[in-house]
Amino acid sequence: MAAPLTLKLNAYTELSSADRAGFEALSRRSIREVCARRDLIREGDRPRSVFLILSGWACRYKTLPDGRRQIVALVLPGDLCDLHVHALRTMDHSVGAITPLQAAEIGGDEFEQLLQDHPRIAQALYWDELVKIAIQREWTVNLGQRSAYERIAHLLCECHLRLRAVGLAQEHSCPFPLTQADLADATGLTTVHVNRTLQELRKDGVIELYGRKLHVPNLQRLKSAALFNANYLHLDHEGRHLDAGD
């Protein structure tokens, strides 16, 4: 059940069979199912567990007092929701389900024990946290410098590559359940502007969107439209020389 996560972590450090089995065992103990558009955990809640997304899409978001929402990150299958969040007294943001969601709920103490017993997992998760920080930097650049056309193209490209890295996308297509309102909240645009920009991307032959699926006829064209450099995702197996063996 933890296959997307182990696929991702293997890009950073080659996990042993014991490492994979340890994660699999924890991911089966307690599974939460959350309906689409419901919260997995809310700002102000006391976090007691680490959540591993097994299936479905979620997002981290902040809400202003007047109800405006900013999506600050997308949480995809294989992602852990805040590695050491159980150390906090209260949540400073919410995690909400975009689609129906399955998440493994791992107790804080159990998770810390896993890291102690399996140092390769701890090392791989350290790399994963660095990638999350890099993604956050890129989202900041998106909001501050890229045009609407570039912002949306960049987000679509990132989603496609992240899903492909965990075996959930084909070469030219991937699931894409985000609504135009979600895209607006993630890119700092209005829904009208998002609609207009998606039409431009379609007209230019850069993307096709239909049936909650994204089709990318030419990935290089999408990258060019987004001014996209994939180096921040660190998908080139930088840690493969750290072979754990079996």
Image (tube, rainbow, N blue to C red):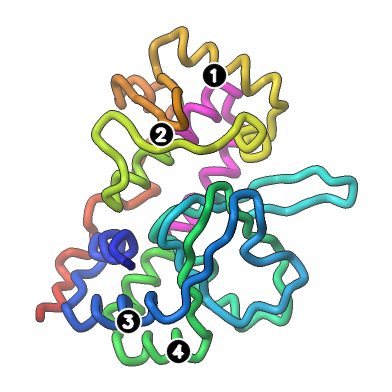
Q: Nearer the viewer, mark 2 or mark 3?
A: 3
| Residue 84 belongs to magenta span | no
Q: Report the number of discs.
A: 4
Q: Residue at x 51, y 57 (%)?
A: 101
User: x and y percent of residue 172 in the render?
Assistant: 28, 29
- Label 4 CA crowd tier, 10 Å (few <14, some 14–19, many 20+): few
User: Which residue is tagged 2?
Assistant: 157
Real-space Cα distance between discs 4 and 2? Answer: 35 Å
Q: Amino acid at mark 2?
A: Cys
Q: Is residue 153 above or below residue 133?
A: above
Give the mark nearest the N terminus, 4 or 1: 4
In contact (CB < 8 Å): disc 2 and disc 1: no
Residue pictured at 38% horizontal, 75% vertical:
27
- Identify the residue under disc 3: 25
Between marks 3 and 4, how big is the CA–CA gap? 11 Å
Task: Tell which circle, 2 or 3, labels the residue nearer the N-terminal end.
Answer: 3
- CB of mark 4 within 8 Å of CB of mark 1? no
Which residues fall within the magenta stretch? 131-156
Residue 246 horizontal/vertical position (percent)? 10, 81
Which secondary structure is most common in the magenta stretch?
A: helix
Nearer the observer, disc 3 or disc 4? 3
The residue shown at (36%, 25%) is 215
Classify 10 Å Cα crowding around label 2: few (below 14), some (14-19), many (20 and above).
many
**Does the magenta portion include 135?**
yes
Residue under circle 1? 198
Place residue 43 in its image quadrant.
bottom right
Image quadrant assignment for residue 77? bottom left
Is 135 above or below relative to 214? below
Q: Tag on residue 110?
A: 4
